[in-house]
Image (spheres, rainbow, N blue to C red):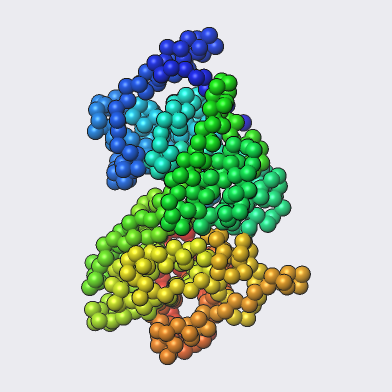
Amino acid sequence: GRSARLRPMRALPRNGTPWLAAGLLQGNLVSALLDAVLARRMAQLPKLPSIAHLRRDGRRRQGLAPLPLQAAGGRKSSMRRVAELAVLGDDLAYSWFVPSQQGTVALLTAPTLDLADSTVEPCLLEHIAVRLWFQLLPEAFANETLVAVKQRRLDRGVPLWALWNFLSESRPMSLVRSSRIFGVLRALAEAPFSRSLAAVSSTLSVDMCARRGFSPWACRAGNSSLLAAFYRHRDPGLPVDVAHRLLSSGDRLTRSSGHLALADRRRNLGEEYEEQLNLGFSELLAFFGERVGKGGDFLAAALPHDGPPTHLVFHLLDKLGLALEEFVGVADPGDPRFKAVTLRHVVKMSLIPDRDLVSDHIRRFQLLHCPEVFKQQLALLATASGNASRSTLRVVEVGGFLGDCLLWAAGWLGRDRLRALEVEPVGAATARLQRSLIHNDFDSSVQVLTEPLGDGSSTFLAAGSGAGGGATSNPNFFTREAADAAASRRRLRLRCLDEVLAQWPPTAAGEVVDLVRVKAAGSEAHIVAGLRGHLAQRRVRRLLAECNQDAEAKIVEMMRQFPWYVRSSDRLAKGNNPV
């Protein structure tokens, strides 16, 4: 009820005068004057560097007061405002695609809204994206933000003519790489489906459907098969036969989805993809152009009014604009006592080719998604012997996804001082981790195993697409214990960590593991139970389990049978509890 309709776009010259006349005839003086001013300003815009080049500069300014509305213009001032608004667009996209943060975007305070106002001229496309967020996705913001948005009149009116000009005059590759507009349009395409899921249950969301392989009945309501295929095949992308079926459709947006799906797949496989991107974009422009010529709302025609999206154009364009690799810093643990002999200041990290919690965090902050408690525990081990320059540490991580912590360990300690094992059930994540290890020449120090683990005795149901093996592309793989006989065909007997370590060369002869980290989406207690053999033989020096309170209680109770282990008092500031 809080969302507003977009004003229909009219094909008009860029000088603004016809806009003013048309608006006056409709009796909307304020809106007509605003449109006329925007049109005249557009004709006078200076050439500015790519937004992508400015985004990193904007992050360095994060936390500083944005420039006031009255700030003197000039090229340098405009560039700084463009950079700040690019960061704002990233923040909005990140918040919408992280379910726990929907409705809690507190960053849009008055100074940031000043920024949205002041960048109408130097960065109109990003300004349009922010307006679309405000007007069509109000549930993404806190109430206090919506009140401020309404006071600024950012809750009404979008200059669709400017959006059409950008889309029709820009080179597709440059536009996809430099703008976050497609992230906004992707969220708009999912919003009706997301609302219908929330009406069924407050725990349901598109993210939850993706995690469960679209198996709940509510996730299959309407025609969600296309959206389900998109989330099941994020890496390397939709199968070729599916893309060709989309290409054979008589609908322009469906054909565009087919071309873009091929472009996405080729990009993720390291192949040339610009030709398919151009073909897909041409189909999208043809669809928009048909409606522009009739004076209709071309954007609303491409967005669903209810249910799942019927095409994947905006999903794929957003995905094609996400970085596949990032250079991230390797920082010291923050204690002057912990100083390693070798320090690799920067590592190159390969990311999942779509939005997910870890990859989006790395893209947004250029920081490894590794908790400080892990860094501190490893640093204590590295400096405890008094002979740190020659000691080699054995580290095992279960559920590290993209292996942020092991990449940090290899960078901070140096590859010659680390022997590590990553056990992760998500094939898409381990494939990207292997690339990261090769990029940084860490592949001789870190071994990767694609496999879900359990306690060695229980059987589990694998939830999500392809969860029966390591090839699943769902970055939120999880298991649950199988209790009913009807599910026997889907039961899996998962190996335990004791079995894995018995076959890992650095520990196969009875060596001690210096640090074991377990973070496994609710399965931590089962995995720690599968380490009983090593714990009973005191072959683990430190165990770090990041888990919820239920799993924490089970782990603490189980560890009572091993009194030689003493629980540390270290705890994370927020989130999961480290045991």
Residue at far right of view? 486
- From what the image shows, is residue 186 above or below residue 217? above
* Front residue of 293 and 179: 293
Identify which residue is drawn at 58% across, 34% down. Answer: 302
- From what the image shows, is residue 471 above or below residue 253? below
Dividing the image into 4 quarters, which one contains the N terminus?
top right
Residue 564, how many percent across, how many down?
A: 44, 85
Q: Is residue 518 left or right of residue 38?
A: right
Quarter-of-image position of residue 392: bottom left
Residue 218, how many percent across, how many down?
A: 70, 50
Quarter-of-image position of residue 292: top right
How many numbered discs?
0
- From what the image shows, is residue 194 above or below residue 409? above
Q: Is residue 194 left or right of residue 164?
A: right
Identify which residue is drawn at 43% across, 55% down. Answer: 271
Q: Is residue 311 visible?
A: no
Residue 510, how many percent across, how many down?
A: 43, 90
Q: Is residue 515 left or right of residue 26?
A: left
* Front residue of 218 and 228: 228
Q: Is residue 334 left or right of residue 130?
A: left
Identify which residue is drawn at 36% across, 55% down. Answer: 326
Q: Is residue 306 visible?
A: yes
Residue 136, how many percent across, how many down?
A: 55, 33
Identify which residue is drawn at 63% across, 67% down. Answer: 462
- From what the image shows, is residue 247 above or below residue 432? above
